[in-house]
Image (tube, helix red, strand yellow):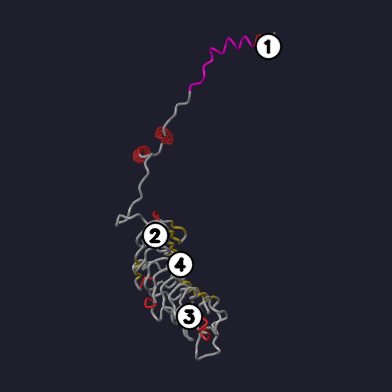
Amino acid sequence: MKTLQAALLWVLLVPWVKPAPPTPQRSTTEILEEIWDYEEPPQDEKTTKKKDIMAILHALQKDESATEQPARNEDGEMPTCLLCVCLSGSVYCEETNIDAVPPLPKETSYLYARFNKIRKITAKDFADIPNLRRLDFTGNLIEDIEDGAFSRLSLLEELTLAENRLLKLPALPPKLTLLNARHNKLKSKGIKANTFKKLNNLSFLYLDHNELEAVPPHLPESLRILHLQFNNIADITDDTFCKSNDTRYIRSRVDEIRMEGNPILLGKHPNSFICLKRLPTGTYY
């Protein structure tokens, strides 16, 4: 009986029950105005601060859907760290279609500018970047490099210029350990006689797939890997790698010399390799 009475009471009362009115949606501006009025700042500061905040809010609401365009430099170009990626002293400008070396942050140590359209490197490009240690310009259109572009970079250790259009090598920095200039158009006349002579730290030298007619002279004792394959080298002498006047001389650090793909029979020059631990790779007969 009690259950029946409760059910009857529920049926009679439900039509008279009204849902609570929905909470009105307030804008950010209204909420901020309410909070501001509640805090009651000093009267002499209230008007100025309130106007400033309201102006900012209105501006943000007005342009809420718009994306602000980054500022451009004096030349109308995008800032380097917006066009490229800058991360802890490294700048990555790969496949960005740049046609010149971009202005770099002064703290830059590593620059990767591969697969772009750079045609020339000037002495001014790195004049104010003293901490550079690695440069990679693989896959550009570089034809000319000014002599002072790299020679003053006292900390530079690795320089990659592969897959460009170079006809000659520039002056190189003293601490260089790696030079990669493979797949260019280098001829022997484009490499000065003393280019490598004073590079006492140079360990890796890649000059394959060029147009060299001779092995570069004065290769440093520090050299470990030398790639000269697929050039036009037709002759070598007893002094190319060794010292003809010193039969006890051993070039102990060299691990690999590649000379295949050149118009030379290495078997005709047995005395040219007596100082080496391993024979060069190439055609012997």
**202 or 263, which lies in front?**
263
Looking at the rendered image, the disc whose residue lies closer to the viewer, 3 or 4, is 3
Q: 10 Å neighbourhood of mark 1: few (<14), some, or many (≥20)?
A: few
Mark pair 2, 3: CA separation: 32 Å
Looking at the rendered image, the disc whose residue lies closer to the viewer, 2 or 1, is 2
Report the span colored magenta.
7-21
For residue 120, side relative to residue 12 (left or right): left
- Residue 3's label in the rendered image is 1
Main secondary-structure element of the magenta-colored stretch: helix
Q: 10 Å neighbourhood of mark 4: few (<14), some, or many (≥20)?
A: some
**189 or 10, which lies in front?**
189
Identity of the amino acid at label 1?
Thr
Looking at the rendered image, the disc whose residue lies closer to the viewer, 2 or 4, is 2
| Label 1 with label 3: CB-CB less than 8 Å | no
Identity of the amino acid at label 2?
Asn
Disc 2 target residue: 116
Label 1: state its secondary structure. helix
- Residue 220's label in the rendered image is 3
Q: Earlier in the sequence, mark 3 or mark 4?
A: 4
Q: Earlier in the sequence, mark 4 or mark 1?
A: 1
- Residue 77's label in the rendered image is none
Image point (39%, 55%), residue name: 83
Locate residue 1: give its quadrant: top right
Looking at the rendered image, the disc whose residue lies closer to the viewer, 1 or 3, is 3
Label 3: state its secondary structure. loop
Identity of the amino acid at label 3?
Pro
Residue 39 visible in the snapshot: yes
Identity of the amino acid at label 4?
Arg
- Residue 134's label in the rendered image is 4
For residue 12, side relative to residue 227 (left or right): right
